[in-house]
Image (tube, rainbow, N blue to C red):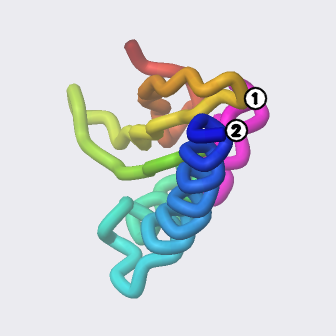
Amino acid sequence: MAMQRAQRLLRIGWVLSLELLLWPANPSRIGAAEAAGAGELSPTQATALVQKRYAARVVRASSSQAGGRHLYVFLLLSPDGKVWTVRLDARTGSEVP
């Protein structure tokens, strides 16, 4: 019972996080402005790719720079409750260790 409630709360949090993080009032917050002009994946495209590739829900999304690359960083939640982080190269869509 408690596990189901926790999962329900995580789902609600996921929806709210996705809305707040992927469609912010300031698009540069997660790199959408840069991605649009540089041939990179948009935040929406990157999110869809990660969810499909890992069969998990995005709990949190952000962007960062590492080694001169624009990265999307996702916190994922699997249906069985596993939580992990994936870093995705915004240009190639490949996972970055």
Bounds of the magenta segment: 44-57
The residue where tag 2 is placed is 51
Given the image, on which type of amino acid does mark 2 rest? Gln
Where residue 22 appears, x then y in whole percent? 51, 66
Where residue 18 appears, x then y in whole percent? 54, 62
The answer to whether residue 78 is magenta is no
Given the image, on which type of amino acid does mark 1 rest? Ala
- Left or right of 95: which side holds 62? left
The residue where tag 1 is placed is 55
- Left or right of 5: which side holds 73? left
Q: In which quadrant of the rendered view does residue 65 lie?
A: top left
* Residue 10 against residue 86 in the figure, above or below: below
Q: Residue at x 57, y 40 (%)?
A: 2
For mark 2, give the secondary structure. Answer: helix
- Comparing 58 with 26, the one in front is 58
Q: Residue at x 54, y 34 (%)?
A: 76
Where residue 70 appears, x then y in whole percent? 35, 42
Marks 2 and 1: in contact by CB < 8 Å? Answer: yes
* Residue 1 against residue 17 in the figure, above or below: above
For mark 1, give the secondary structure. Answer: loop
Q: In which quadrant of the rendered view does residue 1 lie?
A: top right
Q: Residue at x 49, y 41 (%)?
A: 90
